[in-house]
């Protein structure tokens, strides 16, 4: 017999999330993901001065506001034909990378790991250690990570003036020039954050973690550190629970590319669908067949619109359903590293597909890959040289800003008519990952990943396996519907 169960709201998730699960024989047979909070930023922006977007879009989210600012600045820069000076590009990269790494840290320690301290795992050999280390609020990890994160986020003061909702990121670069003394402080902050990561999270040098090239190498590396650092702790628990068999979606991954470093981005754009393919942004469409939105045909974001239609028959979410060439894709750190070709991530996915363990590994791998590059970016900054070129007036123009936020691919599409914003469309990472079904009935990535997951009827709230799958995507629901 199939039963239906509604789960939500979720704690330790940014924003509101509701799942409807159809369960048979103790496992999810189908899932329907609802983003139940409509916000309306795209309507707010219509009719505003183009530069007002830099004030409004960071307010979409208090966790990933910099990513929204960078996407808006890039869309405006394209519309204006502006290119930032080298200092401005480096400062923008550093600001976005600092926010992304801080998000990864918050997700791992404060959102994801507390589930291992739940009573459902009381019979596991590692349960006492997990409770002592990761239990929400009282676990020892909280006291370690919050001061380290707060100190790391001091970078935002030097780079962006404040966080969240900075106004320093502009179409022409960064309006917050750095002096030599501030550059030195950034070097110190990065060194201190590296020391925390190497001592507490990894128990090894970042370069050694970045060099891991296979699942076998990862497990060999884990064994002597499983009680000494937190990433190896996670790997040991995940191996015991077989989380590598949980939460597989499409195994089709997309990245817009991240951190442009002059000639090329650190992580390139592309699509992985059994092999590496070029990304054709023009093939993106947003389907609204199961969304509480008006419209019939799936439209490209640049041509799309966002008009709510509450109570629409057949709809069950405020989230649209983005598709790439009509196909479901997953985005996020796992997608970035698959497209970038990191051998460890490619091996994990080749063996088990995209899964809970692989998503967390990819997210933490980015500490090891990005922080050393941040150290180099700081060294390349030249105080006294230009950081920002002035914005130019817009009359009739279009622009597109594509960035990689912590949670994946974020796109802003801007149209200006007679000096005012005529249309502004945003497709966020969680819009991709938590999308509802499309007109063909194809489920979104999370809906696919939940099929087959254990969902015992007697549990209160969301079953723990369901929680692991949901959190492995690191959802930001307030960005989803914006």
Image (spheres, helix red, strand yellow):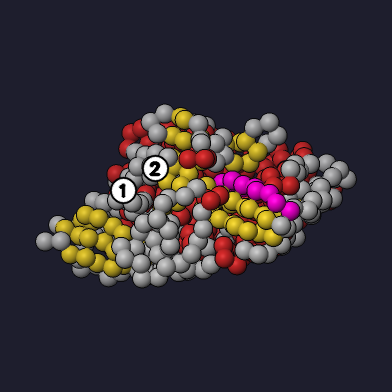
- Can you identify the residue that label 1 sits on? 440
Residue 425 in view here: yes
Q: Nearer the viewer, residue 284 or 462?
A: 284
- Along the line of sight, which residue is nearer the eye, 424 or 408? 424
Question: Is 398 contained in the magenta span?
Answer: yes
The span picked out in magenta is: 395-404
- Residue at point 52%, 40% (across, down): 282
Tell me if residue 43 comes above or below residue 175 in the rendering.
Answer: below
Q: Main secondary structure of the magenta part?
A: strand
Q: Are marks 1 and 2 in contact (CB under 8 Å)?
A: yes
Q: Secondary structure at mark 2?
A: loop
Q: Nearer the viewer, residue 240 or 28?
A: 28
Q: Label 1 to label 2, Cα distance in Å?
A: 9 Å
Q: Position of residue 2 (x, y in %)?
A: 15, 61
Tell me which residue sits at (46%, 55%) in the image.
Answer: 430
Q: Which mark is residue 326?
A: 2
The spot of residue 8 in percent (x, y) is 35, 69
Residue at 81% x, 47% y is 389
């Amino acid at each position: 017999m199939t039963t239906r169960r509604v789960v939500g709201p979720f704690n330790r998730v940014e924003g509101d999330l509701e799942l409807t699960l159809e369960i048979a024989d103790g496992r999810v047979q189908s899932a329907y993901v609802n983003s139940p909070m409509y916000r309306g930023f795209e309507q707010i922006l219509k009719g505003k001065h183009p530069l007002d977007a830099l004030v409004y879009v960071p307010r979409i989210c208090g966790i990933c506001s910099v990513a929204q600012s960078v996407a808006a600045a890039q869309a405006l820069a394209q519309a204006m034909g502006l290119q930032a000076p080298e200092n401005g590009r480096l400062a923008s990269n550093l600001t976005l990378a600092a926010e992304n790494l801080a998000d990864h840290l918050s997700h791992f320690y404060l959102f994801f790991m507390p589930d291992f301290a739940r009573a459902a795992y009381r019979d596991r050999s590692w349960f006492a250690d997990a409770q002592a280390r990761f239990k929400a609020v009282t676990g020892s990890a909280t006291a370690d990570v919050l001061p380290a994160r707060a100190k790391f986020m001091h970078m935002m003061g030097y780079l962006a003036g404040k966080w969240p909702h900075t106004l320093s990121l502009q179409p022409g670069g960064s309006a917050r020039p750095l002096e030599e003394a501030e550059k030195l402080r950034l070097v110190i902050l990065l060194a201190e954050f590296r020391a925390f990561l190497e001592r507490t999270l990894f128990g090894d040098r970042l370069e050694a973690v970045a060099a891991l090239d296979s699942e076998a190498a990862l497990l060999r590396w884990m064994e002597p550190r499983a009680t000494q650092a937190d990433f190896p702790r996670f790997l040991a628990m995940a191996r015991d629970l077989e989380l590598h068999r949980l939460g597989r979606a499409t195994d089709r991954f997309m990245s817009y590319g991240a951190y442009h470093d002059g000639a090329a981005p650190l992580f390139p754009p592309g699509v992985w669908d059994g092999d590496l393919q070029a990304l054709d942004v023009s093939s993106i469409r947003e389907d609204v067949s199961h969304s509480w939105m008006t419209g019939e045909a799936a439209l490209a974001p640049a041509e799309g619109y966002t008009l709510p239609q509450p109570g629409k028959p057949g709809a069950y979410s405020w989230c649209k359903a983005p598709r790439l060439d009509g196909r479901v894709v997953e985005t996020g750190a796992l997608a970035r590293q698959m497209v970038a070709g990191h051998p460890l991530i490619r091996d994990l996915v080749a063996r088990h597909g995209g899964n809970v363990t692989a998503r967390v590994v990819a997210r933490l791998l980015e500490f090891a890959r990005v922080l050393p590059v941040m150290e180099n970016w700081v060294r390349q900054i030249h105080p006294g040289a230009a950081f920002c070129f002035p914005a130019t007036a817009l009359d009739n123009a279009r622009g597109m800003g594509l960035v990689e936020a912590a949670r994946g691919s974020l796109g802003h599409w801007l149209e200006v008519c007679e000096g005012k914003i005529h249309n502004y469309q945003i497709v966020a990472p969680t819009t991709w990952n938590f999308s509802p079904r499309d007109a063909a009935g194809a489920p979104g990535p999370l809906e696919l990943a939940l099929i087959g997951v254990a969902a015992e009827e007697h549990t209160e709230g969301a079953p723990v396996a369901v929680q692991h799958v949901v959190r492995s995507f690191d959802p930001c629901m307030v960005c989803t519907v914006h």
